[in-house]
Amino acid sequence: MAVGASVAPSVSAQPSESGAAAVATPTPAEIARAQELTDYINAHATPGSPRAVNGLRRDVATRPLGPIVDTVGVGPVQRGFWSAFVYSQFHPNVAPPGANDWNCKPKAGQRPVVLAHGTWENAYNNWAAFAPVLKKAGYCVFAPNYGRTDLLNGGGLGVVLPGTNGEVAIEYSAAQFGDYVDRVLKATGAKKVDVIGHSQGGLMVRQWMKFGGGADYDHPERSKIGKLITYGATHKGTTLLGIGALGRGINNLGPAFNVLGVTELLVGRSGIQQTVDSPFIKNLNRSKLVFPGVDYTIVGSRYDEVTTPFDLTFIRRPGVNNIVLQDGCEQDTSDHLSMSYSPRAMSIALRALDPERFARLACGPSPWFFSF
């Protein structure tokens, strides 16, 4: 389907006073049916191919992205998100320490670990503490910057800042990520990777798994992923402290109430897709929430102010290890941004990757928001 091609089931037109058929305003139910069809087409399209749009919503198509651009140089280790954020404003393309060594070969019994940052984040400010811990533990670590686009391509106002990524439609980020994983597998000689995702990063990886060839439900041995570990991921969307839920409710009243379309100009396409009950969230979670042969560790923080309520991050299926960060360590008050700088969060990942070597979990103070 060509870029911008619209999907619009027939809408009953009522005759006008002149006897001609007037253009009818689609009902919310008709818009919803058109959106289901649009989502179905996009879900089964070849990754990276043009995106169908819902003609009844007057949606705006976004462009697929090219390959992920390699990071340039390596930044220093950071102790908190905001110090890493400031550094990345001046060095937006650096890798976190310990990551993106394309000559690295995994040790016996290990898989390469790929880190997926969140919305408006980058490989460095998300993982400047996490990546070196994994590298020290002996892993080959890879951290891409995915989903960078422009304002006219659904990027939102975040694109004006250097080093903001994960803005474009998540389907396109997932296609980029899939190509990157293929490159990691080829470079390392591994058959599978393990993935750690923060916020949108976890959700985006599941999109790749389900619709981009990352995981195979019927033939688990063909899956390209062995373990998925996520922190504050928007697996079931977010109400964003009620703002997102309110916007979604207003939007569902009909095209005249498209407040999220206006909001998209601010937060970007991926931000709107992550609101609770969005068509994207519904489509991803309609079936196959988990894949056989993949180990899931899902971590949420009671103090998360972005993924709200925080337990929307959990995937409640047999075999999924859902963890509240504060269980057993109340002094860890990590919020959404500081979670990837929490010593306990890092130890949870290490235990998930290798429970025999890293059985003990760390516990110590980790601040809410003021992570420097």
Image: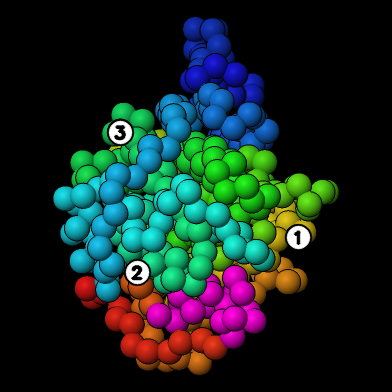
Q: Which mark is residue 129?
A: 2
* Distance CA(mark 2)–CA(mark 1): 29 Å
Kindly tell me whether residue 254 is visible in this rendering. no
The amino acid marked with disc number 3 is Asp
Dot 2 or dot 3: first in sequence order is 2
Instruction: Give the percent coordinates (x, y) of residue 291.
Output: 73, 56
Q: Is residue 174 left or right of residue 286?
A: left
Q: Is residue 157 left or right of residue 48?
A: left
Q: Quadrant of residue 341?
A: bottom left
* Nearest-to-viewer mark from 2 and 1: 2
Verify CB contact (< 8 Å) between mark 2 and mark 1. no
Q: Which is nearer the eye, 169 or 141?
A: 141
Decide whether residue 344 is among the magenta residues.
yes
Element on which disc 1 rests: loop
* Distance CA(mark 2)–CA(mark 3): 29 Å
Q: Which is nearer the eye, 6 or 333?
A: 333
Q: Quadrant of residue 79?
A: bottom left
Q: Residues within 10 Å of mark 1 (few under 14, many from 20)?
A: some
Extent of the magenta region: 343-359
Kindly tell me whether residue 50 is visible in this rendering. yes
Q: Residue at x 45, y 75 (%)?
A: 346
* Nearest-to-viewer mark from 2 and 3: 2
Instruction: Give the percent coordinates (x, y) of residue 178.
Output: 56, 41
Residue position marked by numbered label 1 in the rendering = 293
Q: Residue at x 34, y 61 (%)?
A: 97
Dot 3 or dot 1: first in sequence order is 3
Instruction: Give the percent coordinates (x, y) of residue 7.
Output: 59, 24
The amino acid marked with disc number 1 is Gly
Q: Residue at x 59, y 63 (%)?
A: 107
Residue position marked by numbered label 3 in the rendering = 150
